[in-house]
Amino acid sequence: MPVRGRLRGYAGRRGGSARESGAEPDPAAGERWEQGRYAGPYLRDALLDAGALVETLETATWWSGLPGLYEAVGAALRETLTALGTPPVVLCHISHVYRAGASLYYTVGAAQLDDPLAQWGAAKRAAGDAILAAGGTITHHHGIGVDHREHYAREVGPLGVEVLRAAKAVLDPAGILNPGVLIA
């Protein structure tokens, strides 16, 4: 069952619970989010047209690792894009909640450089390195694909890659399903 409220005045970021910090639930927050949740893709297009770089990425980890992962990925994105001369706005929310952990979903906005693919590529590589260093998984609900292939191979290790390669050889011997996407 999804949580339908957000907490105002949350002071418990560095420890303790929101309720322990004196925060009050805002029951209407969930409804407001639900009404506007699909407006983002339309806003993204307008921002891209205006010369902004707007992208998202996601990760997941255990509950105990969320604070460190949150800080590491945000810092990597801010440091990389700022070094390129485009200080970003980095937003993050928890998109999925499980007994053992949760998914962090980042939205990043910055001024767009002449080569936005290289610009985002640098930021995404830094974020991927931070994710793995902080014990997160390189992906969650967006899937892996070419964008995450290098970091995914690092996450699962050589044996994991060989297991995937062996499964693909048996299930797709002609190599027609997503050739070169997950396994180089």
Image (cartoon, rainbow, N blue to C red):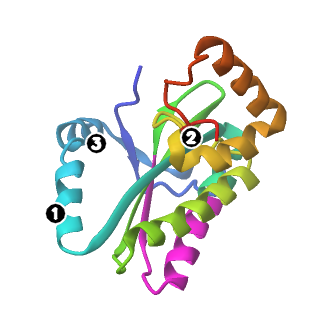
- Relative to 93, is 79 above or below? below
Q: Quadrant of residue 153?
A: top right
Residue furthest to the bottom in view is 85
Residue furthest to the front in view is 174
Question: Which residue is rendered at x = 78% and y = 29% of the image?
Answer: 162
Q: Is residue 16 among what the camera can see?
A: no
Question: Which segment is the magenta one?
Answer: 72-93
Which residue is under mark 1? 46
Q: Are marks 2 and 1 in contact (CB under 8 Å)?
A: no
Q: Is residue 22 among what the camera can see?
A: yes
Q: Is residue 79 magenta?
A: yes
Q: Who comes first in sequence, dot 2 or dot 1?
A: 1
From the image, which quarter does the N terminus lie in? top left
Quick check: 122 left or right of 3? Answer: right
Q: Residues within 10 Å of mark 3 (few under 14, many from 20)?
A: some
Q: Quadrant of residue 54?
A: bottom left
Question: Which residue is rendered at x = 55% and y = 64% of the image?
Answer: 74
Q: Position of residue 91 (x, y in %)?
A: 42, 60
Question: Which residue is rendered at x = 75% and y = 55% of the image?
Answer: 133
- Residue 29's label in the rendered image is 3
Q: Is residue 84 magenta?
A: yes
Which residue is under mark 2? 139
